[in-house]
Amino acid sequence: MKFLDEAKIYIQSGAGGNGCVSFRREKFIEFGGPNGGDGGRGGDVIARAVDGLNTLIDYRYLQHHKAERGGNGMGKDRHGANGKDLILKVPVGTQIYEEDGETLIADLDKVGDEVVLARGGNGGFGNAYFKSSTNRAPRHANPGQPAVEMTIRLRLKLIADAGLVGLPNAGKSTFLATVSAAKPKIADYPFTTLHPQLGVFAVDNREFVMADLPGLIEGAHEGVGLGDRFLGHIERCRVVLHLVDGTSEDVAEAYRVVRHELEAYGEGLAEKPEIVALSKCDAMTEDEIKAQIKALKKAAKKTPLVLSSQSGQGVKEVLRALLDVIDKARQMEEPKPKDKIEAWQP
């Protein structure tokens, strides 16, 4: 399935049904009076976050969505049927914006979250509604309220506990494929990852979700390479794993390039907890590893971890470090119990 994280769609709620002008006409019944029914209410357009979806591809090829119109009122005091609501099922983590792409309408970050985007029009009153002691034969009815039309933009931000960043060919996809059941494309050329990948990682009988993003290069915030649009998928992450290719000539510069792109993107990515790891250690000697660790430590201001996705060396240590940060973040997010009030005693 093709990954799509942005979509522009047109929605329209259901218009209300028209009221009816009708009079009772039966044999032997004189002055039957008005009996026109009211129109039905139009359906709403509702967006709902559901489980099992991770892309907006459904809205790539079907861009116009309309709720059902309310039925018209009829004689014999018969009211029109209400129109059915239209429910737009979207992945968890979808943000809904107005047409300008900046005004946020809703952020559906939990399963079952929903928002009414366009309300259906009310049905018009039939002439039976207007009868009174002074107006016994009203000959007018109300039309139904018109539909609400609008253009909205859907933007998906994947829900993951950790985000995986680095330069192209830093070993991100190999790391994801080795430790999780995900099957990203792996090759010996840059930009093999063209869209984010999700993987479930397990360590010490614990699990967490990690998002692998396409590689960043210098100038990504200006659109160079694949750009930095995919960085939106780690805005919700609790920790960032920064992989640096240990076989590169200048690991310090490789680290600084990615950090600069995170800072240029903004949205608090540069302030997120970061774990730095030196990858591909199986292709280096002990002396080379020590030299690269020293250079990377000077640039990152922290001691990097060392791993090899091929041999498995250091992988569990990296996963445990990630899980430790995730657990601390989860504890801080949990609501604190209210102070207990001691029972009154005489």
Image (cartoon, rainbow, N blue to C red):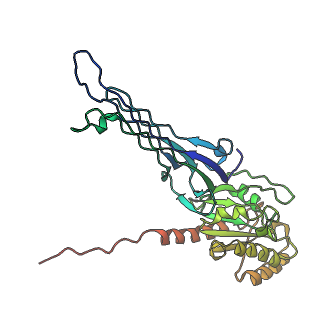
Left or right of 325 in this view: 116: left
Quadrant containing the N terminus is top right
x and y percent of residue 262 in the render? 71, 72
Which of these two is toward me, 113 or 252? 113
x and y percent of residue 300 in the render? 73, 80
Q: Is residue 66 above or below residue 319?
A: above
Residue drawn at (22%, 16%) of the image: 28
Residue drawn at (40%, 72%) of the image: 336
Left or right of 169 in this view: 59: left
**Res. 261 in view:** yes
Residue drawn at (56%, 41%) of the image: 66
x and y percent of residue 79 in the render? 36, 32
Q: Residue furthest top?
A: 27
Left or right of 192 in this view: 84: left
x and y percent of residue 207 in the render? 58, 59
Quarter assignment of residue 196:
bottom right
Quadrant containing the C terminus is bottom left
**Res. 52 in view:** no
Q: Residue furthest left?
A: 346
